[in-house]
Image: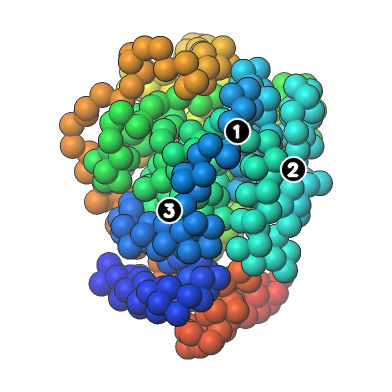
Amino acid sequence: MINEEYVYKVVSKIKKDISKCLLHQKLENALTLVSLCARVLYTTAIYYKDDDLESAMQQVALSLWGDFSENRDEYKCNGDVILFYDGFGLNERGLAQIYLDALCKEKKVVYVTYSDRKDLIPDIEQIVARYNGELRYIRRKNQSFIKQTKELINIIDSFCPEGFFYYSTPDDVVGTQILYIYAGLIKRYFINLTDHSFWIGVGALDKCIEFREYGARVSHEYRDIPKEKITIVPMYPKIHEEREFLGFPFEKRADQKVFFSGGALYKTLGGANKYYEIVDHILEVHQDTIFWYAGSGDDSQMQLLMNKYPNRVFLSAERSDLFQILERCEFYLSTYPISGGLMFQYAALAGCVPVTLKKDEDSEGFLIKQETLGIEFNDTYLLYEEVNRLLDDCDYHKQRSVIMKKSVVTEDAFEKEVKQLFEETSDDWIFPIYEHIDTESFRNEYLNRLTKNDLDRIFVAKKYRKVTLTRYPLKFLMGSTSIAWKMFARFFKK
């Protein structure tokens, strides 16, 4: 476990090195260090924005590319074209598909992601092609951040889009440069998928698009984004009902019931180990149940459950038939202490009642009038009561299932909100002022589950190692050693 003081020391050291790089015009190194620092801040969640990093990004953009806004007359903006920059390049997870579906109906879309993702996004490519959009790819392998940015600039200048939709990782210094470079020339829409933690780009957006009230409140209060720049566009899950169920990864008897959970395993760690205590209780009380978790990460706690309940606890990789899985499960147990938003929605649409222990406001706002649905519980006793009824009372389960299916935003409602992003004809969707939101307890959970080794491993990441190997040799060594020990332990376990 680490504390804020330790993280501040790490961040302070990186920021001093960024300043040195800027002073000596080592701009590629500066970008690398900004990305590294952003990754540390995202991982630890000690705060939500950093003015020094934003200033560094702006300084690099000006040093490399000059002030584009001075050449306003040379940029012939095409009002029918928008560019969608996808720094994730994920086919299924996230919001790319639903935004592209909506945006392509309003404008000509130029979709840009990285070339190493090209063969991994068939559904996204199909959406763009269906509406006669354009697909462009940026090379990442063996390419500096500066060269990647140059490729993106060339794409933008060849299409002259009116709007730039930014959808990317919290440490993306390529897309963020674009936000700074084209300030005043292009309308910059920032899709905030990471509403719960740190990201760069706060100082370079025209519209911050949130998917729930919680994120809007955090951006207004903690990122200091003016309320007139924030809008809420509730998301919905992209469902593929036509897909076949690929089967259970275990033998299931007719009299057994499956409850499901999934996502990154780090979301289940911490919180006084409550998540695993809940699973353990359900399995002990309901002998006819099987617990299935689909996800990846630190599985140490899951292994303990698997050993205690052989043939009743199963861990698998994430699956493309998630909706079909949920249709066959009795209920969805949300991760804790960090909840998963889209999983709430997938479960609800599948009629699989989501159930969660509530830690703070992070679990709010994923379903319509979620506070009235009775899926969040302030103590385990009440949660167990709900689980018991769902497992033992068929009529009650059916009633709850019907209610859940009506609690998710529809595709039409979502597309109407996206269309208003361009029209801005009314102010009824502009973010109002809300009361104070306290996120300290939620953010502390990030620190509680982290060790120094966890942070050291960040310094070994491929995109940072050219800089970190020479500037932070001890952290690089410790991180490399930690990774090697984890690989050894995994091999030994097998």
Residue at 58%, 38% in the rendered image: 75
Where residue 3 appears, x then y in whole percent?
A: 29, 69
Amino acid marked by disc 3? Ile
Instruction: Compute the Cα span from label 3 to label 2.
Output: 24 Å
* Quadrant (top left/top right/bottom left/bottom right) for the C terminus: bottom right
Is 322 placed above or below 299 here? above
Residue at x 30%, y 28% (from the top left corner): 228
- Mark seen at residue 76: 1
Identified by mark 1, the residue type is Lys
Residue receiving disc 2: 136
Circle on res. 200: 3
Q: CA distance from mark 1 to mark 2?
A: 20 Å
At 53% across and 87% down in the image, what residue appears?
A: 470
**N-term mark: 1 or 3:** 1
What x and y, as percent, mark residue 335? 46, 44
Question: N-terminal of the two: label 3 or label 2?
Answer: 2
Give neighbour class at mark 3: few <14, some 14-19, many 20+ (Cα, 10 Å): many
